[in-house]
Image (spheres, coloured by chain):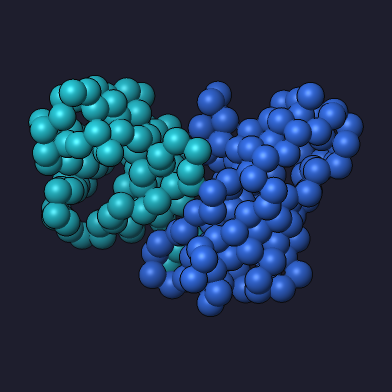
Chain colours: A cyan, B blue
Amino acid sequence: GEDVEQSLFLSVREGDSSVINCTYTDSSSTYLYWYKQEPGAGLQLLTYIFSNMDMKQDQRLTVLLNKKDKHLSLRIADTQTGDSAIYFCAESISGTASKLTFGTGTRLQVTL
Amino acid sequence: DAGVIQSPRHEVTEMGQEVTLRCKPISGHDYLFWYRQTMMRGLELLIYFNNNVPIDDSGMPEDRFSAKMPNASFSTLKIQPSEPRDSAVYFCASGGGNNEQFFGPGTRLTVL
């Protein structure tokens, strides 16, 4: 079955790097996603990675995928106060904007 | 495009009343999703449609919940009768064929 887990909370200092981790159980995942939710808002897609990739970089964001361990991480370089939000990882089995299974979300707190 | 539009943004009602939540997806998207978010259970997929047809409603909690999509530009989620445990933020999301889901701002429902 599908199960996606994340740690609940992460606190980092402004300017440091943040690493948010996620584990999933379904080895047939085709796409893995990172979404950001700011207070009072819906989820916003940050980035996604195909299951046949190991890494994807997009400006300050780096996604690493370890298929053997079913582990996904999101690294945010030079973390800013505007990065404070809840970050969700999600997996898709059949892809093409169909059903996603979301993790529990990690609340990132950026301190000065 | 204005993005996914949801109404109302906030709804306060009394137990036993009927509640109707509305969603206008992004034009051209052929997938529409309804989610519920609570502190206890996180983000749950309730139902999703493809080309106005319900594909998977296994997340709908019980018969009190129903969803319709009469055309490509409109969907409703109805709760009748509502109960205090239905209090949550309800999100609508739409997607095309490129693996992304775009979320609306959500409707915060409080059932007294």
Q: Residue furthest front?
A: A112
Occupied quadrant, residue B83: top right
| Image position of B83 (left or right of A63) | right
Residue A83: percent from the left, percent from the top?
A: 27, 38
Examine the image and state in which quarter residue A92 appears: bottom left
Q: Residue at x 11, y 39 (%)?
A: A78
Compared with B53, B61 (above or below) is above
Task: Specify whether B77 is left or right of A18.
Answer: right
The residue nearer to you, when weighing B112 against B65, is B112
- When asked about the image quadrant of residue B38, the answer is top right
| Residue A11 on image: x %, y % | 24, 22
As drawn, B79 above or below A96 = above
Q: Position of residue A26 (x, y in %)?
A: 37, 45
- Tell me if I can see residue A94 in this picture: no
Point 76% across, 39% down: residue: B62
Please state the total of marks drawn on the protein image: 0
Residue shown at 14% from the left, 54% from the top: A59
Q: Position of residue A86 (x, y in %)?
A: 37, 35
- Name the foreground residue: A107 vs A67: A107
Res. B109 in view: yes
The image quadrant where one finds the C terminus of chain B is: top right
Residue visible at 55% across and 74% down in the picture: B27
